[in-house]
Image (cartoon, rainbow, N blue to C red):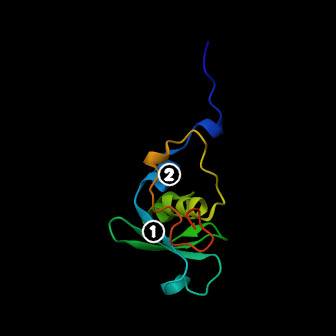
Amino acid sequence: MAVVQTSADVLDDVEVRALTECMTVLDDVGRARDAPGLYVVVSSSGASYLVDHREGRCECPSQFYRGGECKHLARVAYALGDRDIPDWVNEDRVDDQLGQHVHGGQNE
């Protein structure tokens, strides 16, 4: 008997990176300060990108060249609690900083 996977059973590569890579989402620094819907996402490499959560845009090269959702947009959605982490995801693999620096975030 074949096992059928639903979208709730599978995370795409962008979602996996958004949950597992070390990134910090900030809502009160730089260009995001006092700007509703804007977030600065700092990656483990030290690069930072402005994410417009309301418009679904990020200034990273990945979104510019490939289009669609990038890991920074997905990270903001997870950090804010706008996107649920599936129950079956191993919590030990999720970055423990997820939502820590966002007002109203997952870890607040």
Residue that protrudes farthest toward the left in the picture: 45
92 above or below 73?
above
Per the rendering, the mark at residue 14 is 2
Q: Measured from the top left, where is residue 64 in percent x and y?
A: 49, 65
Q: Nearer the viewer, mark 2 or mark 1?
A: 1
Type of amino acid under label 2: Val
Q: Measured from the top left, where is residue 107 in percent x and y?
A: 55, 63
Q: Quadrant of the N terminus?
A: top right
Disc 1: which residue: 24
Type of amino acid under label 1: Thr
The residue drawn where x is 64% and y is 60% is: 81
Q: Measured from the top left, where is residue 30 in percent x and y?
A: 48, 86
Q: CA distance from mark 2 to mark 1?
A: 16 Å
Image quarter for residue 87?
A: top right
The residue drawn where x is 65% and y is 33% is: 6
Q: Quadrant of the C terminus?
A: bottom right
Image quarter for residue 61?
A: bottom left
Q: Earlier in the sequence, mark 2 or mark 1?
A: 2
The residue drawn where x is 52% and y is 50% is: 15
Left or right, 72 with reference to 54: left
**Label 1 crowd (10 A; few <14 / some 14-19 / many >=20):** many
85 above or below 47?
above
Label 1 element class: strand
Residue that protrudes farthest toward the top in the picture: 1
Left or right, 15 with reference to 53: left
Of 24 and 12, nearer the camera is 24
Label 2 element class: helix
